[in-house]
Image (spheres, rainbow, N blue to C red):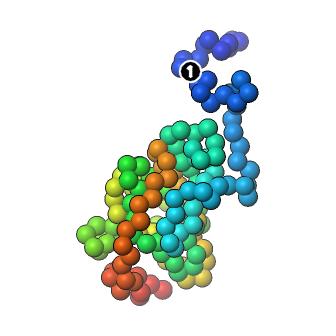
Amino acid sequence: MQLTEGDFPGDNSMYATNGLVVPVVTRGGLESGLTGQSAGATRIAGVSPQHTPARRLWFGKVSNEPGFRSVPHHHGEAETGGFVLSGRARIYFGAKFQDYIDMAEGDWVFVPPYMPHVECNLDRNNPLTWMTTRTPDNIVVNLDDVADEALRDWSERP
Protein backbone atom coordinates (compact mmCIF):
# COMPACT_ATOMS: atom_id res chain seq x y z
CA MET A 1 0.00 0.00 0.00
CA GLN A 2 1.34 3.42 -0.96
CA LEU A 3 1.14 5.92 1.95
CA THR A 4 0.66 9.61 1.42
CA GLU A 5 1.21 12.52 3.80
CA GLY A 6 -2.51 12.63 4.59
CA ASP A 7 -2.38 9.03 5.90
CA PHE A 8 -0.52 10.07 9.05
CA PRO A 9 -2.36 11.58 12.02
CA GLY A 10 -1.09 14.73 13.71
CA ASP A 11 0.93 17.68 12.58
CA ASN A 12 4.72 17.60 12.87
CA SER A 13 5.31 20.69 10.74
CA MET A 14 6.81 22.50 13.75
CA TYR A 15 9.90 20.32 13.23
CA ALA A 16 10.38 21.38 9.62
CA THR A 17 13.65 22.89 8.44
CA ASN A 18 13.54 24.53 5.01
CA GLY A 19 10.04 23.09 4.55
CA LEU A 20 11.04 19.47 5.26
CA VAL A 21 10.55 17.30 8.34
CA VAL A 22 13.58 15.03 8.61
CA PRO A 23 15.43 13.10 11.33
CA VAL A 24 18.19 15.12 13.01
CA VAL A 25 21.51 13.39 13.68
CA THR A 26 24.05 14.54 16.25
CA ARG A 27 27.34 12.99 15.16
CA GLY A 28 29.56 11.30 17.74
CA GLY A 29 31.99 13.84 19.18
CA LEU A 30 29.66 16.74 18.36
CA GLU A 31 27.30 16.32 21.32
CA SER A 32 26.39 19.47 23.24
CA GLY A 33 27.87 20.19 26.66
CA LEU A 34 25.52 23.16 27.05
CA THR A 35 23.23 21.36 29.47
CA GLY A 36 22.64 21.16 33.23
CA GLN A 37 25.63 19.85 35.17
CA SER A 38 26.51 18.65 38.70
CA ALA A 39 30.00 18.54 40.15
CA GLY A 40 31.31 14.97 39.87
CA ALA A 41 29.18 14.12 36.81
CA THR A 42 29.63 15.23 33.22
CA ARG A 43 26.57 15.39 30.97
CA ILE A 44 26.54 15.72 27.18
CA ALA A 45 23.35 15.89 25.12
CA GLY A 46 22.82 13.90 21.96
CA VAL A 47 19.19 14.98 21.59
CA SER A 48 17.99 18.08 23.42
CA PRO A 49 16.00 21.27 22.98
CA GLN A 50 19.31 23.18 23.08
CA HIS A 51 20.62 21.82 19.78
CA THR A 52 17.89 19.86 17.98
CA PRO A 53 14.21 20.51 17.26
CA ALA A 54 13.29 18.29 20.27
CA ARG A 55 10.84 20.06 22.56
CA ARG A 56 9.97 17.51 25.24
CA LEU A 57 12.96 15.18 25.37
CA TRP A 58 16.56 15.20 26.59
CA PHE A 59 18.72 12.16 25.75
CA GLY A 60 22.39 12.08 26.55
CA LYS A 61 25.40 10.49 28.15
CA VAL A 62 26.43 10.99 31.77
CA SER A 63 29.90 10.03 33.01
CA ASN A 64 31.49 9.78 36.43
CA GLU A 65 35.27 9.50 36.61
CA PRO A 66 36.75 6.56 38.57
CA GLY A 67 35.78 6.75 42.24
CA PHE A 68 33.88 10.03 41.83
CA ARG A 69 30.32 10.88 42.74
CA SER A 70 27.98 13.72 41.95
CA VAL A 71 26.84 16.30 44.44
CA PRO A 72 23.28 15.77 45.69
CA HIS A 73 20.76 16.99 43.15
CA HIS A 74 17.31 16.36 41.67
CA HIS A 75 15.79 16.84 38.25
CA GLY A 76 12.76 18.96 39.05
CA GLU A 77 9.64 17.93 37.16
CA ALA A 78 11.63 15.66 34.83
CA GLU A 79 11.13 11.92 34.82
CA THR A 80 14.51 10.25 34.32
CA GLY A 81 15.38 6.92 32.74
CA GLY A 82 18.94 5.63 32.87
CA PHE A 83 20.90 2.72 31.44
CA VAL A 84 24.33 1.69 32.74
CA LEU A 85 26.37 1.46 29.55
CA SER A 86 29.65 0.64 31.31
CA GLY A 87 30.88 0.45 34.88
CA ARG A 88 29.36 -0.03 38.33
CA ALA A 89 26.95 2.55 39.70
CA ARG A 90 25.34 3.47 42.99
CA ILE A 91 22.51 5.92 43.61
CA TYR A 92 22.01 7.26 47.14
CA PHE A 93 18.55 8.57 48.00
CA GLY A 94 16.11 8.90 50.91
CA ALA A 95 16.35 10.77 54.18
CA LYS A 96 19.93 12.07 54.51
CA PHE A 97 20.83 9.77 51.58
CA GLN A 98 20.82 6.74 53.90
CA ASP A 99 19.46 4.36 51.25
CA TYR A 100 21.13 3.21 48.05
CA ILE A 101 20.83 0.87 45.10
CA ASP A 102 23.75 -0.59 43.14
CA MET A 103 23.73 -1.26 39.41
CA ALA A 104 25.98 -2.86 36.81
CA GLU A 105 26.34 -2.78 33.03
CA GLY A 106 23.01 -3.49 31.38
CA ASP A 107 20.83 -2.32 34.30
CA TRP A 108 18.05 0.24 33.82
CA VAL A 109 16.78 2.72 36.42
CA PHE A 110 13.85 5.13 36.74
CA VAL A 111 14.33 8.19 38.97
CA PRO A 112 11.05 9.97 39.83
CA PRO A 113 10.71 13.76 39.58
CA TYR A 114 12.00 15.88 42.50
CA MET A 115 13.84 12.94 44.14
CA PRO A 116 17.15 14.13 45.65
CA HIS A 117 19.93 11.65 44.91
CA VAL A 118 23.69 11.19 44.50
CA GLU A 119 25.09 9.32 41.48
CA CYS A 120 28.30 7.39 42.20
CA ASN A 121 30.96 5.44 40.38
CA LEU A 122 31.76 2.46 42.59
CA ASP A 123 34.89 1.58 40.62
CA ARG A 124 38.05 3.41 41.70
CA ASN A 125 39.85 2.50 38.44
CA ASN A 126 37.37 2.72 35.56
CA PRO A 127 34.86 5.34 34.41
CA LEU A 128 31.10 4.91 34.71
CA THR A 129 28.95 5.79 31.70
CA TRP A 130 25.17 6.11 31.69
CA MET A 131 22.77 6.71 28.82
CA THR A 132 20.06 8.95 30.24
CA THR A 133 16.78 10.38 29.04
CA ARG A 134 14.56 12.99 30.64
CA THR A 135 11.28 14.66 29.91
CA PRO A 136 10.92 17.53 29.23
CA ASP A 137 14.59 18.58 29.44
CA ASN A 138 17.80 18.03 31.42
CA ILE A 139 16.70 19.87 34.55
CA VAL A 140 19.47 19.78 37.19
CA VAL A 141 18.89 21.34 40.61
CA ASN A 142 22.09 21.03 42.63
CA LEU A 143 21.77 20.78 46.41
CA ASP A 144 24.22 21.27 49.26
CA ASP A 145 26.95 18.66 49.21
CA VAL A 146 27.31 16.01 51.90
CA ALA A 147 30.54 14.58 53.28
CA ASP A 148 31.69 11.22 51.95
CA GLU A 149 31.44 9.88 55.50
CA ALA A 150 27.71 10.67 55.54
CA LEU A 151 27.11 8.24 52.68
CA ARG A 152 26.73 4.76 54.14
CA ASP A 153 29.31 2.26 52.80
CA TRP A 154 30.83 4.83 50.37
CA SER A 155 34.29 5.13 51.96
CA GLU A 156 34.54 1.35 52.51
CA ARG A 157 33.76 0.29 48.93
CA PRO A 158 36.35 -1.98 47.31
Residue 40 screen position, x and y as percent: 51, 73
94 horizontally vs 45: left or right: left
Seen at 45% across and 54% down, the residue is: 139
Q: Quadrant of residue 23?
A: top right
Tell me which amino acid carries mark 1.
Asp
Q: Relative to residue 6, is residue 35 depicted above or below?
A: below
* Residue 29 quadrant: bottom right
Residue at the extreme left: 95
Q: Quadrant of the N terminus?
A: top right
Can residue 49 be seen in this snapshot?
Answer: yes
Residue at 64% of width from left, 42% of height from top?
A: 52
Residue under pointer 1: 11
Q: Is residue 138 left or right of residue 155?
A: right
Q: Residue at x 43, y 72 (%)?
A: 71
Decide which of 83, 97 is in the foreground and name it: 97
**Helix, strand or loop for disc 1:** loop
Q: Residues within 10 Å of mark 1 (few under 14, many from 20)?
A: few
Residue 140: image location, x then y, percent: 45, 59
* Residue 131 visible in the current orientation: no
Q: Determine the residue positioned at 62% across, 59% down.
A: 33
Q: Position of residue 123 (x, y in %)?
A: 54, 79
Q: Residue 17: percent from the left, percent from the top?
A: 70, 30
Q: Nearer the viewer, residue 65 or 54?
A: 54
